[in-house]
């Protein structure tokens, strides 16, 4: 039984990497650098992104941990999730939700870079016993998120025909792996979920997701399409960064367990929400004016 679990565990990790790499490469193949960066020219939205993800969500995670009286390890895992933004799942969820994909990609890039700079100096202020190297935070993001995106953008810039041929293939791969990966990871972590059950950790993780969705929606500007993108960008935290920091910066494995449980809860909540948003009729706001770019 242990051998089967080990095999499925490796399959789930490989599945996450396949999804992230194929999705980011496909996004790069479908856009130019100018198209992706254009949404960030709105100063109000730019400040809203930073405020939501690097001020409000970390403070919310800290407040929830204190208010719900979580054990130290659970509190540390929750605060880590509050601090880690730029989740690579967000562009695909935004696409499913009918949100502004270009804005979601630009936001993810900004938050990814911001998280690399933000966590190493800020985390020790909240948890003095923890130190983390910027390279530890940066490595998985650079290799599995930014590199495929850059390669996709470079391919499109060099050969439109090759980009048009590759993009549908990678789109099919990322679409085919999203739900099976979530289901498999959830099934493999049932014990972790039960470990946190009854501690207040699950409630705290749920509340953090809803706070993120609400804050992102409120700061997402007048367009429903950017609101959906920023709500998802704020509601879904960067599991990859949080779990790496949890495993390398903390001795107690419960910190990483809390990160995993919080990530699963976020995906379980926002994935059906994204499908629901995508099926809603268009709002009165003109799609072209929103700069959807899908």
Image (cartoon, rainbow, N blue to C red):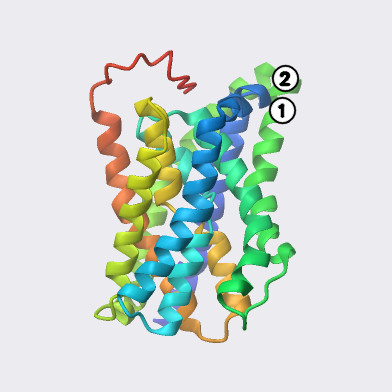
Q: Using the numbered discs, state the Cα–Cα distance from disc 2 to disc 1 in whole angstroms.
A: 6 Å
Q: Residue at x 29, y 53 (%)?
A: 269
Q: Residues within 10 Å of mark 1 (few under 14, many from 20)?
A: some
Residue 35's mark?
none
- Asked whether, in this view, residue 27 is left or right of residue 67, the answer is right
Report whether residue 177 is seen: no
Q: Nearer the viewer, residue 235 or 143?
A: 235
Q: Nearer the viewer, residue 183 or 259?
A: 259
- Residues under numbered marks 2 and 1 in contact, where contact means CB atoms less than 8 Å apart: yes
- The image quarter containing residue 193 is bottom left
Q: Residue at x 29, y 81 (%)?
A: 199
User: Which residue reaches farthest bottom?
Assistant: 251
Q: Secondary structure at mark 2?
A: loop
Q: Is residue 195 above or below residue 132?
A: below
From the top left corner, tell me how far across and down residue 49 is, in percent: 51, 42
Q: Residues within 10 Å of mark 2 (few under 14, many from 20)?
A: few
Q: Residue at x 66, y 48 (%)?
A: 113
Residue 159's mark?
2
Q: Secondary structure at mark 1?
A: helix
From the top left corner, tell me how far across and down residue 234 is, in percent: 44, 48
Report whether residue 262 is seen: yes
Residue 155's mark?
1
Q: Residue at x 39, y 50 (%)?
A: 235
From the top left corner, tell me how far across and down residue 81 is, in percent: 47, 63
Q: Is residue 153 above or below residue 54?
A: above
Looking at the rendering, in which quadrant would you find the N terminus? bottom left
- The image quarter containing residue 231 is top left
């Amino acid at each position: 039984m242990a051998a089967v679990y080990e095999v499925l565990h490796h399959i789930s990790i490989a599945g996450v990497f396949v999804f992230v790499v194929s999705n980011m490469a496909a996004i790069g193949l479908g856009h130019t650098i100018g198209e992706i960066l254009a949404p960030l020219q709105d100063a109000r939205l730019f400040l809203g992104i930073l405020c939501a993800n690097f001020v409000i969500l970390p403070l919310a995670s800290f407040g929830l941990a204190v208010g719900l009286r979580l054990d130290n390890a659970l509190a540390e895992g929750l605060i880590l999730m509050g601090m880690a933004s730029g989740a690579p799942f967000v562009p695909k969820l935004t696409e499913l939700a009918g949100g502004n994909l270009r804005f979601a990609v630009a936001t993810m890039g900004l938050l990814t870079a911001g998280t690399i700079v933000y966590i190493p100096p800020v985390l020790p202020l909240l948890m003095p016993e923890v130190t983390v190297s910027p390279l530890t935070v940066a490595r998985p993001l650079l290799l599995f998120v930014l590199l495929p995106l850059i390669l996709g953008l470079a391919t499109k810039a060099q050969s439109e025909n090759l980009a048009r041929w590759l993009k549908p293939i990678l789109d099919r791969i990322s679409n085919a792996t999203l739900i099976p990966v979530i289901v498999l990871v959830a099934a493999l972590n049932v014990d972790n979920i039960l470990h946190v059950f009854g501690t207040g950790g699950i409630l705290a993780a749920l509340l953090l997701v809803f706070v993120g969705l609400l804050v992102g929606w409120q700061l997402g500007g007048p367009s429903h399409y950017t609101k959906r993108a920023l709500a998802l960008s704020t509601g879904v935290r960067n599991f990859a960064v949080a779990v790496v920091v949890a495993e390398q910066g903390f001795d107690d494995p419960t910190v990483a367990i809390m990160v995993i449980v919080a990530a699963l809860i976020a995906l379980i909540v926002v994935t059906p929400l994204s499908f629901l948003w995508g099926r809603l009729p268009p709002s009165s706001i003109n799609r072209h004016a929103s700069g959807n770019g899908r």
